[in-house]
Image: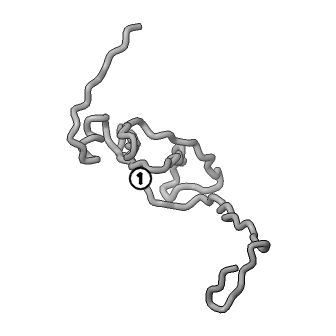
Amino acid sequence: MKTTNNEIYDADEVKEVRQAELEKKITHVGYLKPHKGHKIWEFNTKTGDIRIAEMEDVPHNPFNKAKSGLPEGPKKKLMTKENCVYVSALNIENAVKKIGLKVKVVKVKTKK
């Protein structure tokens, strides 16, 4: 038996305590609107990989009209991943500059 703070615990009265799983919720982090012709690049801080970010099409409301009266364009939602940084850039070389890495990008051609 252990005694702490005037409480007595018996060895026979052991209980299992497990952490409750938290529900994953969609949270709004911010906006990242790329310039015309730009792409959203994803940089993984753990592995150092740079690739084009995955986007998901979002259905739009046909009754919601733009203020100018023009039809709305297609809307996309960025699929965020853990330990990743997102940058809008024209190509991979500019994405590397914006992230702040001092790396030379080498393109490898594969034989077909």
- Which one is in front, 49 or 98? 49
Q: Which residue is mark 1?
A: 32
For mark 1, does the 10 Å Cα neighbourhood hold few (<14), some (14 to 19), or many (20 or more) residues? few
Q: Nearer the viewer, residue 5 or 82?
A: 5
x, y (%) of residue 87?
35, 47
Task: Give the farthest residue toward the bottom.
Answer: 6
Vertical comparison of 63 with 76: above or below? below
Q: Which residue appears at 48% of the width and 60% of the height?
A: 29
- Residue drawn at x 65%, y 55% as measured from the top left: 63
The spot of residue 62 in percent (x, y) is: 64, 50
Q: Residue at x 38, y 43 (%)?
A: 43
Q: Quadrant of the N terminus?
A: bottom right
- Asked which secondary structure carries label 1, the reply is loop
Residue, far top: 112
Specify the quadrant of the image occupied by residue 16.
bottom right
Amino acid on which disc 1 is placed? Leu
- Residue 72 in picture, x, y percent from top left: 53, 48
Residue closer to the observer: 98 or 11: 11
Vertical order, 30 against 100 (above or below): below
